[in-house]
Amino acid sequence: MQKLKHLRHVMSPLDLTTEELDKMMDLAEDMEAKPEKYAHVCDGMKLATLFYEPSTRTRLSFETAMLNMGGSVIGFHSADSSSATKGESVADTIRVLGCFADIAAMRHPKEGAPMVAASVSPIPVINGGDGGHQHPTQTLADLMTIRKLKGRLNNLTVGLCGDLKFGRTVHSLISALVRYDNVKFVLISPEELRLPSYVKEDVLAKNHKEFTEVIRLEEALPSLDILYMTRVQKERFFNEDDYVRMKDFYILDEEKMGLARDDMYVLHPLPRVNEISVDVDADPRAAYFRQVYWGMYMRMALMFTLLELEVK
């Protein structure tokens, strides 16, 4: 286990300055272009994945990122396969995993659980998603995708559509983008799933960012540079009837895409259910699978940075 000079954790995109984010995106591009240069930087190191909630992309993206750098992976992919079923706390779990691994990625259904782990952890902890709160590494994937496709992270009109109330990816992305100049937000949701007032007040208004709230996707599409679609998350609903009523509120299809600019790109944190029709997949503006691809390189760059690695 490597002894770090400056132990750092990433709970939110705000734990990284815009300068650090830019540097990390440059590093990710270099990792994509020259994989052999980074193939052994993590030789002998281990990533612990502590996933108390189901995950496909995030967990496998982290694991692939570590394997690409020559490291190995330990951990669990659900609470049922961990000592959480015996009542072990996240604080004790991270202390144990810290004896075996060099860095950890944690996903948990409870907001703040990764922060509790980080407060006692002997190794860097990365928040892989905590409840409806934050999902910083998805935001790294989002920022990288926008920069690759649009060439910038400023002077953008960004539409966020779907579940803005519980969507941790939306909350994280807004927190990151408000730090860039002249970014406007169009918040597209039914009234029941609107962005929480604390995000509007503490993040958007506090940073003097322009935003509008609309219900109809068609109304917003012509003005957007980026459309960020999200699914209505069944696991966040207490009432099955409410979920059924909301789940198909927005469906983006090729007909609606005809209302958008030729250089507007569609992002989605995935998994999608019905909110993007498969006929959109062939549209060159559909960027959600490229988002997954670049997200893996951003996780490589993040771990490289937190582990204080250097290319020999």
Image (spheres, grey):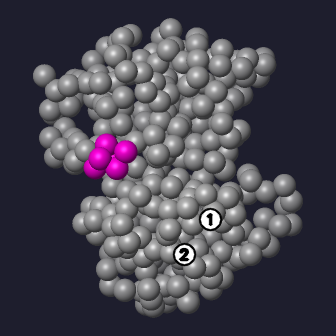
Q: Which residue is mark 1?
A: 200
Tell me, yes or no, whether the two marked residues, 2 and 1, touch with CB atoms within 8 Å. Answer: yes
Image quadrant where one finds the C terminus: top left
Q: Quadrant of residue 88?
A: top right
Seen at 63% across and 48% down, the residue is 133
Seen at 58% across and 11% down, the residue is 96
Seen at 51% across and 55% down, the residue is 175
Q: Please, is residue 6 above or below residue 276 in the view? A: above
Q: Please, is residue 233 above or below residue 120 in the view? A: below
The majority secondary structure of the magenta stretch comes to helix
Q: Amino acid at mark 1?
A: Lys
Category of crowding for the residue at label 1, using alpha-carbon neighbours closer than 10 angstroms: few (below 14), some (14–19), many (at least 20)? some
Image quadrant where one finds the N terminus: top left
Q: Nearer the viewer, residue 127 or 185?
A: 185
Q: Amino acid at mark 2?
A: Phe
Q: Nearer the viewer, residue 76 or 125?
A: 125
**Residue 310 pos. (x, y %):** 20, 25
Could you say which disc has been placed on residue 211 in the image? 2
* Extent of the magenta region: 17-22
Residue 24 lies in the magenta-colored region: no
Q: Please, is residue 229 above or below residue 264 in the view? A: above
Q: Quadrant of residue 304?
A: top left
